[in-house]
Amino acid sequence: MKTIQITVPKVHCVKKNDLLNKDKVYLVLIVNALKADVNVSPRVAFCGLSPIAEFKKNDIKILDLGTKWSFNLEEGEAFNITFGLYEKDNGKAYNDYLKKITEIVETNGMTYSDALMKVWDKLKDKLTSLNWISLLTLLPEVGLEILKNFREDDLLGRRTITFKYDDPNMQFVPEFDLTDAESFYKIQLKLTD
């Protein structure tokens, strides 16, 4: 088993969503882990909701995640990180998300497991064999199904990235372009084990 830490070393506001005020942006991130065995269900390894950060055009910031964002990965598991960047319109929506994420972390029960199981039951029949290529192709669908529940604020963009247990590509710090009709952000995620 190893622990993987997530940091966000860069968020760049190329074009903001709110024309008059600063964008109030937050990150929702979900990690799902899965072994190459259709009899073993995927698990939610981590859920996180960042504090709100304010951006004006051309701001570049390190996103303060408040606490350490990390998760444990068992040998032989693949995992995907699904994340969405949102612009806060409704304070109630953000507070509700914060409550949900806190409940998930505090109970360690991962209340999203019902949604995860629903998607997994649909997807596992698509697997033609127990190989990593099949799993890595389907795993992002699981995270995206969960992430679409966070829809009351403006979704600026979302992505899913997938890795195997000892994937050398984990050491790279990719930059993702997140765009919608009014805004354009660039974000980096860094994984360290």
Image (cartoon, rainbow, N blue to C red):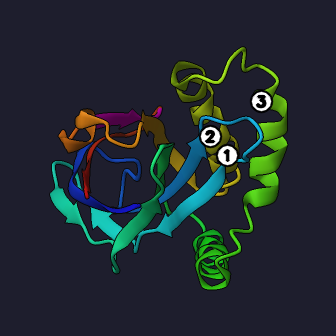
Which of the two discs, 2 and 3, labels the residue nearer the N terminus?
3
From the image, give the main secondary structure of the stretch colored magenta: strand
Instruction: Mark 1: give few (<14), some (14-19) or many (20+) Cα within 10 Å.
Output: few
Q: Amino acid at mark 2?
A: Leu
Report the front residue among 114 and 187. 114
Which quadrant would the C terminus be assigned to in this image?
A: bottom left
Q: CA distance from mark 3 to mark 1?
A: 20 Å
Residue 175 appears in the figure: no
What is the secondary structure assignment of the residue under circle 1? Answer: loop
Q: In the rendered image, which residue does mark 3 sit on?
A: 124
Q: Are marks 1 and 2 in contact (CB under 8 Å)?
A: yes
Residue 172 position within the rendered picture, expressed as x and y whole percent measured from the top left:
18, 39
The quadrant where residue 111 appears: bottom right
Q: Are marks 3 and 1 in contact (CB under 8 Å)?
A: no
Q: Amino acid at mark 1?
A: Lys
Q: Which residues are magenta?
A: 175-180
Q: In the rendered image, which residue does mark 1 sit on?
A: 148
Q: Amino acid at mark 3?
A: Lys
Whether residue 10 sits left or right of residue 69 in the image: it is: left
Q: CA distance from mark 2 to mark 3?
A: 16 Å
The quadrant where residue 66 appears: bottom left
